[in-house]
Amino acid sequence: QSALTQPPSVSGSPGQSVTISCTGSSSDVGSYNRVSWYQQPPGTAPKLLIYEVSRRPSGVPARFSGSRSGNTASLTISGLQAEDEADYYCASFSTSIDFRVFGGGTKLTVL
Amino acid sequence: EVQLVESGGGLVQPGGSLRLSCAATGFSFSDSWMSWVRQAPGKGLEWVANMNRDGSEVYYMDSVKGRFSISRDNARNSLYLQMSSLRAEDTGVYFCARDGYPFSSDYWGQGTLVTVAS
C-alpha cells in the first residue's frame, strides 16, 4: 500500500481538463513544499512534470499545473491531447518511515 | 545531453547479491544528488535510496536498510547500488535518477531489470 493515495484511473476527451489528486498526511504533502509529479508512458522511464508543488521544469508545457490544499496535492492537465495518455505519479518528501514516498499511480485514458 | 545508463541487472536467486551501476554523462555529476527508484512488474514507482554530492549523506527506504548500499565515484561519474540478501519482492526495474531539484528527479535512465527467483 502506497503512502500517498491516488485514484487508479481518470479519463477525459481531447481538449478537456482532468485533475489527478494525491492525498497524503501532515508528515508529507501537507507540511512540505516537496511534492512532485511524474508522467510515465508505457514502457518508458518517468518524466518530471512538476516539482515543489507547482513549479514546472523548462520544456514542460504550461497546460500541466500543480497545486495543493491541505494534505492533498493535485495535478491538472488542460487541453488534453492523445499523447497525454500515460501513468501519472505523485511523490513527496516524508518525515514518516521513508524519506521519500510515491503515490500508487493514476492511469490517464484519453477517450 | 544528459544521459544515465544503468547496467548490472539480471536473474539472481533469493539470498543472492547483485551490484547495479549507473554511468552519467552530460552534466556535472559531482554537483548532483542521485537516487535509485524501482518499479515492480505492473506496479508503481518506489524510492529505494539516495545520496548527496560527496556521498556523506545517504538515505534508504526502510525495507532495504541493512541489505542495500548506495555509493558513488565522482571521478568516474558513476553511481552504484550494492544489493544483498535479495528477496522476491526486490524484483523490478531499477532506475537511476538525478535529483535536479530537492526531492525531485529531473532525469532518469531507462532502467535495468532485476529478477529474484529460484
Image (spheres, coloured by chain):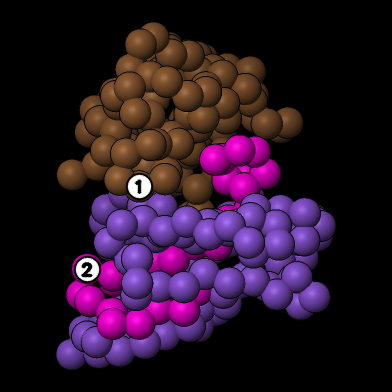
Amino acid type, label 2:
Glu
In the image, B109 versus B85, the foreground residue is B85
Report, in whole angstroms, how far the alpha carbon at label 2 lies from the one at label 1: 17 Å
Q: Which residues are magenta?
A: B81-106
Q: Look at mark 1 in the image and give the residue it sits on.
A: A98
Identify the residue shown where x is 32% and y is 39%: A96
In the image, B72 versus B23, the foreground residue is B72
Amino acid type, label 1:
Asp
Q: Look at mark 2 in the image and give the residue it sits on.
A: B89
Q: Quadrant of the C terminus of chain A?
A: top left
Residue B94 visible at all: yes
Residue B71 point in image, percent of width and height: 58, 72
On the picture, is A81 further left or further right than A12? right
The quarter of the displayed image where residue A62 is located: top right
Above or below for B17 versus A62? below
Q: Colour of chain A?
A: brown
On the picture, is A98 further left or further right than B88? right
